[in-house]
Image: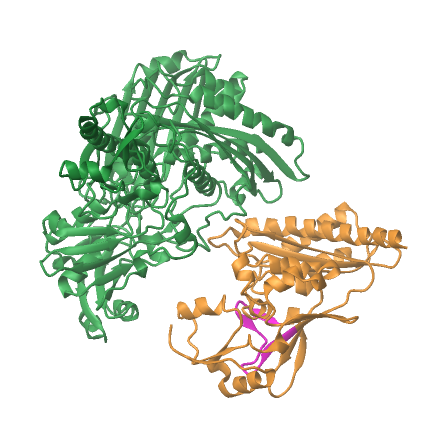
Chain colours: A orange, B green
């Protein structure tokens, strides 16, 4: 590991000023579960490391009528166990609970997982399925992008050298909705071979799918929206055949690779299996919540 | 003995446990000596190459670098290996696997050593390599060693196998494959070495066998063994992997050449790339039986890939061949085992030592036999079970402590308790039950084993035991303490073990081969009994009574209401302490080199396991839901330690069954725990039930015998049989990764 200067700013303003000054010579540190390995292996050799953990504004989960805000340095463990990230937002809690070990979840942050931009990141598909938006800050201006546009390639995001990810915003889902997060791994603590999140909402008083978003991980250079699969189901009252067709389309649209973990053909088949399971589970949840509402009335 | 059972069999907490939990235990990497420097090993990137030249001139100019040492710098023998010394410590002319060592760089800091290592220029002439054992056996294959690629051919012969197979109503035949796996001990290899002013050298190491460290370092430096002293530090696991002291030799060479204390520790990737593995096998088995399921004959060809060196391969293949009939009586036997060289990472000792492979193949065929003859899997095993009258594959009849049939009955109960769950498989899952059985000889297979202990009783009633079998975390120290405490009537807290220093502990051979309880438990018992006898005789003389009527309890010799303290007794007879030495060597008969017949060991231990698994129809993922292990320990000395061993062995076996595989593509291509997958606590059943059967071994200490490796031996077999039952397709290859099982589910013909 090469030596570097370490800063631990207390405010967002101080952090963005440091970023303005050091830009690409610096690396941002949150939980460090990815950065420290890269430093150790000399895959990155920054002259400055800016630790964001002391900035209170970047941490925590806040719910309002508009939606859910999750600060970039919120721990996986906090997300996995927060009562605010349950229910209709539950798939992000499931994604956070799937990252690494319990020790990792007590250290790793949401922003770190997203900014590391691994195609297999377990928090990305649930957030994309939930229509999440990335709120980005810099000393010049703040901006907001849909999370699916945040990723450019393995390890690459749309962040400029002077920018940092401030928080994730998930708009409150309308009406009856259901979600599912599925992953396929070799052991419980393994990086996902494939992961898949589905979030759908039903049309008022009907069993028709008003909208559906399907996001896949580890099958392309970035987390992937399976739009052709969504199109099969949007506006439909789905039957088994439609779900199978959507799953087939998701598999056809994936471009997985052969690597030491598994073959591309197995991954492609897993996209089909996981997508089908995720749609089924999400539908079940959406229909179930309607029954629950009836019961509450 | 008048107070047997006071301490034997009690769940006494090991002394090392609290310190390990609290992070206070000191491992070799916690050791820092004044002026200590660091060594890094430069390894070949090529599987097979000639070393034309090594240019260290730039590396030597790097700040902080003290030396770059190569084969030419080794003063004594440049060879190492647990049994056969055929691996160069530093390769002088030829490298035989990607990972073979060519130089060590010594520097003031690890960083400097690492940076300088990148500046050593080795000119290699790349040579053709052979990576597959079956190809290596073909004529014209590149040679790994001049004498050819078949390192060993070991045979077992009994009866007329061809005639028996011709007459058999049922003949089953299959080829099975097992993989290369890594020990994955928590602590990678490491050592510190320092020369002493008298011209000797001291080593501190993570090791299973300090006396072998001593032997190898003395050979390398050309020093008498008496001038080399080895301290075993707290060792974070061994499982057979810490029997070749390469890091120790590298540290010793640096210390010897520079005069500075030196530390060499392997990083995790280095440990996976360069340390030896479990042998992958290709096994052709043919089994003949009557239509009632009675076994008649076995024909087996076992090819074990020993990698670049044979140091343990000959004994591993011998173990497999001598155990080819498993825990069954098979009248006719023809087995040929080959340890074959390839240009891959060497394979050597690993918990199980040739048994998990053969158990997987044989137990798979036993299940097929059960199906073929329409019997329950337990029943077909019961019909062929060894007892105290029937011979093993080597012709040895075990006259006592063969509780295999009772164990099968217990496993039947466990498997029956799983049966109601079969119908409760969730949608999309297929559920199956499998059993797996095994047996193993305790101790070395190709030679006799001897253990020696020195027991010293002090006047205050405290006891010191010197015995060279080191504890690797499995709990042998508490076993020895309980044995001595039982004999000498003292609390285990009054007993101090000295196992980890070659200057005081006698050489007992390695902590391996499930031998420590049987061999050293006996040596400690015998030495303690000698001490006790001497004390009671002295006291009997003073008290005017028969020593048989005396009791030795808590430092006092008691006779009815009278008593004499050890301090008084010793004082009166001018003893400062009383010491006795004893050794134990079971009776064995060497194996005939042509037929493999002989008495391989003093005792055998048996294992019968049952597993309940779910297979996900969509993903092929296997989940072990329930596991029941029945173990044969002769006599239980410490239940906590035994149960810990069993759970650990079963979990390790589940890794072997499902996910672990060292992949070789030139060199090892998955040298990290992100790519080499050891099961986590989430991947094993929440509860592993452990049943202990006690059928005392008359030659064992208080009836005890070894069992450690038996905890892992049949796990691959049991899980494979459960998976085969669940999916209706016979599994012939380990590990049963999701992807492989998925393929079996969808293309049954493959």
What percent of the width, then of the height, locates residue A293?
A: 86, 55
Q: Nearer the viewer, residue B649 or B645?
A: B645
Q: Nearer the viewer, residue A166 or B170?
A: A166
**The N terminus of chain B sits in image quarter:** top left
Relative vertical location of residue A88 with respect to residue B459 in this rendering, above or below: below
Residue A37 forms part of the magenta stretch: no
What percent of the width, then of the height, locates residue B484?
A: 29, 35
Residue A158 forms part of the magenta stretch: yes
What percent of the width, then of the height, locates residue B444?
A: 26, 33
- Residue B410 seen from this side: yes
Q: Residue at x 80, y 51 (%)?
A: A288
Q: Residue at x 55, y 74 (%)?
A: A53
Stretch in magenta: A150-167
What percent of the width, then of the height, locates residue B667?
A: 34, 53
Q: Quadrant of residue B482?
A: top left
Relative vertical location of residue A12 with respect to residue B322 in this rendering, above or below: below
- Residue B279 seen from this side: no
Q: Quadrant of residue A118?
A: bottom right
Q: Residue at x 60, y 49 (%)?
A: A269
Q: Quadrant of residue B296?
A: top left
Q: Residue at x 56, y 30 (%)?
A: B433
Give the number of marks.
Answer: 0
Q: Nearer the viewer, residue A226 or B115?
A: B115
Q: Residue furthest front?
A: B561
Q: Nearer the viewer, residue A171 or A234?
A: A171
């Amino acid at each position: 590991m090469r030596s570097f200067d370490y800063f631990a700013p207390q405010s967002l303003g101080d952090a963005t000023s440091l970023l303005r000054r050091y830009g690409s010579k610096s690396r941002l540190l949150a939980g460090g579960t990815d950065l420290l390995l890269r430093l150790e292996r000399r895959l990155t050799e920054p002259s400055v490391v800016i630790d964001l953990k002391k900035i209170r504004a970047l941490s925590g989960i806040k719910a309002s009528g508009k939606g859910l805000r999750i600060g970039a340095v919120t721990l996986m463990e906090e997300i996995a166990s927060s009562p605010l990230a349950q229910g209709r937002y539950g798939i992000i809690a499931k994604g956070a609970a799937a990252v690494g070990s319990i020790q990792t979840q007590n250290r790793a942050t949401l922003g770190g997982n997203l900014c590391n931009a691994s195609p297999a990141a377990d928090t990305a598909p649930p957030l994309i399925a939930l229509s999440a938006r990335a709120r980005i800050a810099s000393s010049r201006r703040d901006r907001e992008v849909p999370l699916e546009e945040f990723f450019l390639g393995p390890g690459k995001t749309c962040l400029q050298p002077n920018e940092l990810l401030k928080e994730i915003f998930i708009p409150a889902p309308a009406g009856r909705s259901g979600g599912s997060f599925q992953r396929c791994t070799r052991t419980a603590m393994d990086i996902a071979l494939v992961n898949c999140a589905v979030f759908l909402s039903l049309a008022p008083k009907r069993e028709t799918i008003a909208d559906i978003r399907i996001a896949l991980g580890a099958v392309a250079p970035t987390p992937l929206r399976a739009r052709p699969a969504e199109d099969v189901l949007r506006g439909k009252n789905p039957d088994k055949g439609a779900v199978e067709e959507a799953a087939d389309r998701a598999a056809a649209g994936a471009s997985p690779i052969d690597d030491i973990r598994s073959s591309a053909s197995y991954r492609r088949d897993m996209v089909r299996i996981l997508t089908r399971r995720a749609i089924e589970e999400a539908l079940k949840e959406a229909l179930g919540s309607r029954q629950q509402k009836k019961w509450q009335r | 003995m008048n107070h047997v059972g006071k301490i034997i069999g009690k769940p006494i907490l090991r002394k090392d446990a609290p310190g390990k939990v609290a992070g206070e235990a000191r491992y070799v990497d916690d050791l820092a000596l004044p002026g200590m420097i660091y060594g890094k090993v430069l390894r070949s990137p090529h599987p097979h190459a000639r070393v034309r030249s090594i240019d260290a001139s730039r590396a030597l100019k790097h700040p902080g670098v003290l030396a770059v040492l190569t084969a030419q710098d080794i003063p004594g023998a440049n060879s190492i290996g647990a049994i056969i010394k055929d691996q160069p410590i530093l390769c002088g002319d030829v490298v035989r696997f990607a990972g073979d060592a060519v130089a060590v760089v010594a520097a003031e800091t690890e960083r400097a050593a690492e940076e300088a290592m990148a500046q050593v220029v080795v000119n290699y002439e790349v040579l053709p390599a052979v990576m597959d054992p079956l190809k290596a056996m073909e004529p014209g294959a590149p040679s790994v060693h001049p004498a050819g690629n078949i390192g060993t051919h070991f045979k077992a012969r009994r009866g007329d196998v061809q005639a028996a197979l011709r007459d058999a109503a049922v003949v089953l035949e299959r080829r099975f494959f097992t993989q290369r796996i890594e020990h994955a001990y928590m602590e990678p290899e490491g050592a510190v070495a320092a020369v002493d002013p008298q011209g000797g050298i001291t080593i501190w190491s993570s090791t299973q066998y300090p006396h072998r460290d001593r032997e190898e370092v003395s050979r390398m430096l050309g020093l008498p063994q008496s001038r080399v002293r080895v301290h075993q530090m707290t060792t974070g696991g061994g499982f057979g992997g810490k029997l070749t002291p390469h890091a120790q030799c590298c540290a010793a060479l640096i210390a010897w050449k520079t005069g500075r204390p030196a530390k060499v520790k392997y990083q995790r990737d280095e440990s996976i790339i360069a340390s030896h593995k479990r042998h992958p096998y290709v096994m052709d088995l043919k089994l003949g039986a009557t239509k009632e399921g009675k076994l008649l004959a076995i024909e087996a060809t076992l090819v074990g890939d020993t990698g670049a060196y044979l140091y343990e391969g000959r004994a591993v293949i011998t173990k497999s061949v001598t155990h080819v009939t498993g825990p069954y009586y098979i009248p006719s036997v023809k087995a040929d085992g080959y340890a074959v060289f390839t240009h891959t990472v060497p394979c050597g000792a690993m918990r199980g030592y040739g048994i998990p492979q053969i158990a997987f193949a044989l137990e798979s065929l036993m299940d097929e036999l059960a199906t073929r003859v329409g019997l329950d899997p337990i029943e077909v095993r019961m019909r062929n079970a060894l007892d105290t009258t029937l011979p093993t594959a080597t012709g040895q009849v075990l006259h006592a402590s063969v509780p295999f049939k009772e164990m099968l009955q217990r496993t039947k109960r466990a498997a029956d308790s799983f049966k109601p769950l079969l119908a409760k498989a969730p949608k999309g899952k297929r559920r199956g039950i499998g059993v797996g059985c095994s047996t193993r000889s305790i101790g070395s297979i190709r030679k006799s084993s001897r253990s020696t202990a020195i027991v010293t009783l002090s006047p205050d009633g405290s006891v010191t035991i010197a015995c060279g079998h080191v504890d690797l975390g499995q709990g042998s120290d508490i076993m020895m303490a309980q044995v001595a405490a039982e004999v000498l009537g003292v609390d285990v807290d009054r007993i101090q073990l000295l196992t980890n220093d070659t200057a005081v502990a006698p050489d007992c051979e390695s902590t391996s081969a499930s031998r420590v309880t049987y061999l050293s438990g006996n040596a400690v018992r015998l030495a303690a009994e000698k001490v006790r006898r001497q004390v009671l005789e002295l006291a009997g003389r003073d008290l005017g009574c028969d020593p048989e009527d005396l009791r030795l309890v808590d430092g006092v010799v008691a006779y009815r209401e009278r008593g004499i303290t050890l301090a008084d007794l010793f004082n009166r007879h001018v003893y400062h302490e009383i010491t006795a030495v004893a050794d134990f060597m079971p009776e064995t008969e060497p194996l005939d080199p042509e037929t493999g017949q002989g008495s391989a060991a003093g005792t055998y231990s048996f294992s019968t396991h049952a597993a309940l698994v779910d297979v996900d129809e969509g993903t092929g993922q296997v989940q072990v839901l329930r596991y029941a292990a029945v173990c044969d320990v002769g006599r239980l000395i410490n239940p906590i330690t035994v149960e810990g061993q069993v759970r650990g062995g079963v979990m390790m076996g589940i890794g072997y069954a499902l996910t672990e595989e060292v992949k070789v593509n030139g060199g090892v291509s998955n040298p990290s725990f992100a790519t080499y997958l050891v099961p986590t606590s989430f991947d094993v059943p929440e509860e592993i039930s452990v049943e202990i059967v006690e059928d005392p071994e008359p030659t064992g200490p208080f009836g005890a015998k070894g069992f450690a490796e038996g905890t892992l031996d049949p796990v691959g077999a049991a899980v494979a049989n459960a998976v085969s039952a669940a999916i209706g397709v016979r599994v012939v290859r380990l590990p049963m990764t999701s992807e492989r099982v998925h393929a079996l589910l969808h293309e049954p013909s493959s």
